[in-house]
């Protein structure tokens, strides 16, 4: 069955890149609605922007979607990861600005509110995107692939010269609330030098030590340090789940990212849908539903992100 929210949820705060404060309200939506953003501040163009792979404007720093009228929403990936990771399929996201609030730099505040508010099941059949054969895209020494699997598995490899990050590898099956318990609180990260460079380009204006892990040399500058020893690769996996959620339905496949980012994840989705015989839609029955990311969540999982 498909799901939506039990009641509206409110979030407020600045966007990490624009620095502009926004008010975001997540509202219940009918079956087969999908995840759709509505720019409530837009009055002379179409304010609705579906959170779909073919509406993504590819870029390295965040995920931005745009409709045919040029109405855009930036940095949707953490919210999209929270929606996918809690098993939500139909949501109207009303926002009065161009960028989703960064909150603490992770998906945990969204997850916490969703679990506390509850989900409502809808009498409509859910279908999943089943990967039938591998597709891969490359960019230099970075690549991303999707290959067949019984559920959704994410593998990721990163390599940074800074010793606090270094080389990190992780593979997780996203079934049974794994995202909520192990990934959702992992924050975006950057080098201290990157902060200065981004701000010189008019980006990162809303970023701070309160919503990002900032590292310099062998030190973590963010108060409290790391939430996980390998928080960096966990956040990359969080981003990947959010970007994969723009497929429009749960994915049954193994995503593998090697030094990948938002653009490569979107490119591998485009490659999947452009390759004949690489995927199909399959009905989700009880057995398959139990293997999806949001299945089986309960009060104990809320405690994990409280």
Image: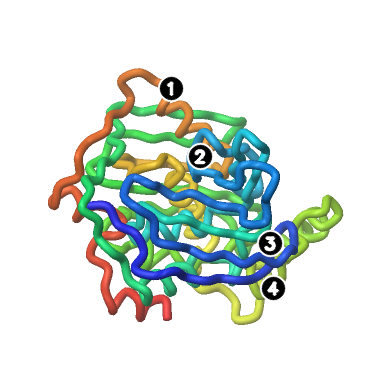
Quadrant of the image occupied by residue 248 = top left
* Nearest the eye: 201 or 230: 201
In the picture, the disc for residue 209 is 4
In the picture, the disc for residue 274 is 1
Above or below 67: residue 176: below
Q: Nearer the viewer, mark 2 or mark 3?
A: 3
| Relative image position of residue 259 (x, y in whole percent) | 55, 43
In the picture, the disc for residue 16 is 3
Q: Residue at x 44, y 62 (%)?
A: 27
Q: Is residue 28 left or right of residue 143?
A: left
- Which residue of the protein is positioned furthest toward the top in this rendering? 276
| Relative image position of residue 81 (x, y in whole percent) | 45, 56
Tally the numbered discs.
4
Q: Is residue 249 left or right of residue 46?
A: left
- Please tell me which of labels 1 and 4 falls first in the chain: 4
Q: How far is the residue under mark 1 from the one under mark 4? A: 41 Å
Q: Are marks 1 and 4 in contact (CB under 8 Å)?
A: no
Q: Nearer the viewer, mark 1 or mark 4?
A: 1
| Relative image position of residue 244 (x, y in whole percent) | 44, 44
Q: Nearer the viewer, mark 1 or mark 2?
A: 1
Q: How far is the residue under mark 2 from the one under mark 3? A: 21 Å
- Please tell me which of labels 4 and 3 falls first in the chain: 3
Q: How far is the residue under mark 1 from the one under mark 2? A: 14 Å
- Please tell me which of labels 1 and 3 falls first in the chain: 3
Residue where numbered disc 2 is placed: 265
């Amino acid at each position: 069955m498909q799901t939506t929210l039990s009641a509206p949820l409110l979030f407020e705060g600045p966007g990490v890149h624009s620095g502009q404060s926004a008010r975001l309200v997540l509202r219940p939506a009918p079956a087969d609605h999908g995840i759709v953003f509505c720019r409530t501040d837009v009055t002379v163009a179409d304010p609705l922007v579906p959170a779909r792979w073919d509406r993504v404007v590819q870029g390295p720093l965040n995920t931005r979607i745009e409709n045919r009228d040029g109405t855009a929403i930036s940095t949707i990936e953490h919210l999209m990861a929270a929606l996918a990771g809690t098993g939500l399929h139909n949501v109207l996201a009303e926002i009065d600005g161009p960028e989703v609030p960064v909150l603490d730099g992770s998906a945990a505040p969204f997850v916490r509110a969703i679990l506390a508010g509850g989900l409502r099941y809808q009498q409509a059949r859910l279908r999943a995107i089943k990967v039938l054969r591998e597709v891969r895209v490359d960019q230099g020494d970075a690549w991303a692939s999707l290959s067949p699997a019984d559920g959704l598995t994410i593998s990721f490899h990163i390599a940074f010269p800074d010793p606090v990050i270094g080389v990190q590898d992780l593979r997780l099956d996203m079934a049974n609330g794994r995202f909520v318990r192990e990934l959702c609180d992992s924050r975006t990260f950057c080098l201290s030098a990157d902060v200065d460079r981004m701000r010189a380009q008019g980006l990162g204006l809303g970023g701070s030590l309160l919503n990002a892990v900032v590292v310099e040399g062998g030190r973590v500058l963010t108060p409290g340090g790391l939430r996980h020893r390998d928080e960096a690769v966990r956040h990359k996996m969080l981003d990947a789940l959010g970007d994969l959620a723009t497929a429009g339905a749960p994915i049954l496949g193994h995503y593998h990212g090697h030094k990948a980012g938002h653009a490569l994840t979107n490119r591998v989705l485009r490659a999947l849908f452009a390759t004949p015989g690489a995927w199909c839609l399959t009905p989700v029955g009880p057995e398959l539903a139990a293997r999806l990311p949001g299945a089986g969540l309960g009060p104990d999982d809320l405690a994990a992100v409280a």
